[in-house]
Image (cartoon, rainbow, N blue to C red):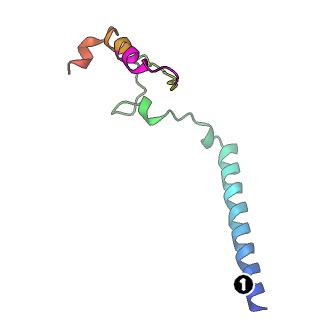
Amino acid sequence: MLLHLLYLLCFLLLGTLAFYTMATGWRQKQQGRANRIQPHPELLDRNGRVIKDSLLVVRVTPRDTDIRSRLEALYNRSPDDERRDR
């Protein structure tokens, strides 16, 4: 009988905490705090501002065996060679 009461108490405690957490998130969303846009950390410079560099998005699939050399050639042809010398 004691084990049943302990189980019930733990279940009620965890359920209460779960509903409290959901209600807190809902309230924050209603107040507008959760609606702020937060960019990915890799898109920020050291001062926390969004970088203005153009980004290259690449989808690499294992079907093409020559993909590494093609990506290196594309990188070497890019116009910002002076930045790579640093």
Quarter of the image for the C terminus: give it.
top left
Decide which of 79, 16 is in the foreground and name it: 79
Find residue 24 and report its horizontal and vertical position in percent: 67, 55
Q: Amino acid at mark 1?
A: Leu
Q: Main secondary structure of the magenta part?
A: helix
78 above or below 23?
above
Q: Is residue 28 left or right of residue 4?
A: left
Question: Which span is picked out in magenta?
Answer: 63-72
Q: Residues within 10 Å of mark 1 (few under 14, many from 20)?
A: few
Find residue 43 and report its horizontal and vertical position in percent: 43, 29
Residue at image position (50%, 26%) is 62
Q: Is residue 31 left or right of residue 53?
A: right
Residue at image position (35%, 12%) is 73
40 above or below 69?
below
Residue at image position (73%, 80%) is 7
The residue carrying mark 1 is 6
70 above or below 13?
above
Quarter of the image for the N terminus: give it.
bottom right
Decide which of 23, 61 is in the foreground and name it: 61
Is residue 26 highlighted in magenta? no
Decide which of 79, 36 is in the foreground and name it: 79
Quick one: SS at disc 1?
helix
Find residue 44 and report its horizontal and vertical position in percent: 41, 31
